[in-house]
Image (cartoon, rainbow, N blue to C red):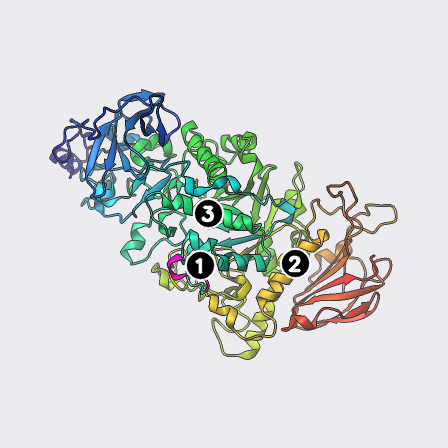
Amino acid sequence: MSSAAEQEAVREGERPRPAAGPRPALNGRPRGADGFGSPVRPGAPNPLGARYRVGPDGVAGTNFALWAGGAEAVDLCLFDASGAEVRLPLTELTHEIWHGFVPGVGPGQRYGFRVHGRWDPWTGARWNPAKLLLDPYARAVDGEYALPPEVYGHVRDWPQQHVADTVRDDRDSAPYVPKGVVVHDDAPDDEWADDRRPKTPWADSVIYELHVRGFTKLHPGVPPELRGTYAGLAHPAAVGHLVRLGVTAVELLPVHQFAHEDHLLRRGLRNYWGYNSVGYFAPHAGYSASGTAGQQVGEFKRMVRALHEAGIEVILDVVYNHTAEAGELGPTLSLKGIDNRGYYRLQHNARHYADYTGCGNTLHVVQPQVLRLITDSLRYWVTEMGVDGFRFDLAAALARSMHDVDMLSPFLAVIAQDPVLRRVKLIAEPWDVGNGGYQVGAFPPLWTEWNDRYRDAVRDFWRGALPDLRDLGYRVSGSSDLYAWGGRRPYASVNFVTAHDGFTLRDLVSYERKHNEANGEGNRDGTNDNRAWNCGAEGETDDPDVNALRRRQIRNLLTTLLLSTGVPMLVSGDEMGRTQGGNNNAYCQDNQTGWLDWSLLGRPGPDGLLALTSRLLALRGAHPVLRRRAFFSGRPQTPDGLRDLAWFTTHGAEMTEQDWYAPSSTLALFLSGRDIPGRDARGTQVIDDSFLIVLHAADRPTAFRLPGPPWAEEYELVVDTSLEDQSAAPGTVHRGGARTTVPARSVLLLRVRDGG
């Protein structure tokens, strides 16, 4: 506990004095006893972290290096299998990096750091050597965080809560926190050299967002011992589903080592999504089937290789905007105890944290060593772990300079010139929770963005809430109003209707209100802006008409997404009608609510949602007109050509300016396959079929005159979402200029038969 002098000072309303004195011995060992028969050698300040190597004299060991700006001393702490600790002082200091080489220490060794310095929270100094700290560069982590009071740098249960974070807690946290693990970077069982990256072009990409644990936890084809793990995702049964579906990339919810929040653990829940990172180099140990003493690294690599062999890229959802240490009342796990003022953005009153994330803290990305941590981590996952890209959670927080979002910020500038990172897929969640944080459409070239304006417009159209057609027209044609600048392309827009955060596709048509009671927060968590329509009944129902309408609406939303210009993103389970029971914030539901229910594939039906999804993705893959690499111009590409994109009213006439502003439930667009700009790899002009897409959201059928010559002589019906049995749709032929009936609430996809 804190000293009596500190306690008395707080009672008197003064600052507690910083604790002082020698660093303690442990287990009767004097400080500096290494227990390995050799003194700690100077080692090298680079690379950071723990790196096993053989020295020039043939002696094997591990070099440890830790940047701890402002620290007074650093102890390396080594742990044996029983948990016994040996502390070794790192006496070498180079450019604020403490380092040393320890002979005899090899792969599998568990370790951490204790960092000494001033305790003065009013100036942001929160050093506390009683707290064992995780190496920010640890390649593997053994154990989980339980977050008892001992892991807090301050006295969590101090009676005066308004100053609790200012009173240092001197209890040892080592028995309660995970340890880093030394990893052999060139482990022979990895066999990484034979990996072949798919390198799918952005325009051809289809992203499938999934959770490693949730995707495989209930999969009947995955052996029980592999379910919920990297090895489970690498299993042929799991990979086979992705291949049959036709996606080109998986976007994995966070797999960096993360911690569970204290308020969840007290309620018997866990952080399921993983947006609470604490180790940016370590695959989350909880997803490993092979062990946590470094084996998780090889298991992750083998998962990546299995997906690559199937032609599927791996994109990581990464959380570099904040960490699991939260604000001043949060635990001391790593960065807070290494150099709180260097790693985190602090307010003018440095006792408190600047919070642009809603999670209590924000990493100080303009600080060079913090920027180095992030970019070193990114390069590691690309070069050594084999991943193909990243989706950056709350990316606007990373793009802030001192306060405002700045598209010339150090982070974006470093990414743009990095020879490794500028070549991988970069996806921004282009907002944060601070002032000026909404930046959709503002990120520079090289970046794609989650386009929430697409999500909102498509949801509103199909629930009958759009005042006119202007916004929908922009969204389904590539959002040129947002991205047609600076050389950006239509694939700058990642189109989505659902994501992990919010309703599933089935819940979007089954609930109008969130039902998050199971989260234990009084249903206050999660957004209230769902833009959902329950089709006439809240939640599950036995009404056959309501259920039929819901199935049709799911087909409409899914078909709209997969026929739109841009990069489509599907959410795991939407292709089979997965539900979360109306929970739109299932971040803490590590159970059947969050896991994918594979029994849905066994339900009877003439032609399931999975078959429709696969067929739409096959169509998209076969037709370049549906995955354009350049924005539409609205003009012919050749003297005798048609407009590359034309819009039509239900009367078969091209839309006028007035039509865009008028209320309407029907939008029709003609995509000319003969007017695609660009050439293929051999320099040949790209030629494709032409298509007419009709989106009709009204609750009654409408008469529609199909555009006749020069647009088309005949049309062949390819998709009609009003049909439960999709096998009945293809092949029906309609003459150009003739009237046809568009069923209520449906999408029609028609292909031009005469090559026009």
Please report the residue visible at 34 percent of the width from the left and 48 percent of the height from the top: 291
Quarter residue 681 falls in: top right
**Over which residues does the magenta segment extend?**
221-226
Q: Are marks 2 and 1 in contact (CB under 8 Å)?
A: no
x then y, percent, for residue 122 = 28, 32
Q: Is residue 465 left or right of residue 136?
A: right
Q: Dot 1 corresponds to which residue?
A: 216
Local SS, label 1: helix
x then y, percent, for residue 460 = 59, 60
- Residue count near mark 3 (Cα–Cα under 10 Å), binned few <14, some 14–19, many ≥20: many
Quadrant showing the C terminus: bottom right
Local SS, label 2: helix
Considering depth in this image, is 456 or 117 the residue closer to the camera? 117
Local SS, label 3: helix
Q: Dot 2 corresponds to which residue?
A: 618
Please report the residue visible at 71 percent of the width from the left and 54 percent of the height from the top: 623
Q: Are marks 3 and 1 in contact (CB under 8 Å)?
A: no
Q: Is residue 631 above or below residue 99?
A: below
x then y, percent, for residue 47 = 40, 28
Residue 359 appears in view? no
* N-terminal-most mark, 2 or 3: 3
Q: Is residue 331 above or below residue 518?
A: above
Q: Is 558 colored magenta in this rendering?
A: no
Number of dots carrying numbers = 3
Q: Dot 3 corresponds to which residue?
A: 302
The amino acid type of the residue labelled 3 equals Arg
- The numbered disc on residue 713 is none
* N-terminal-most mark, 3 or 1: 1
The mark lying in front, picked from 2 and 3, is: 3
Q: CA distance from mark 3 to mark 1?
A: 16 Å
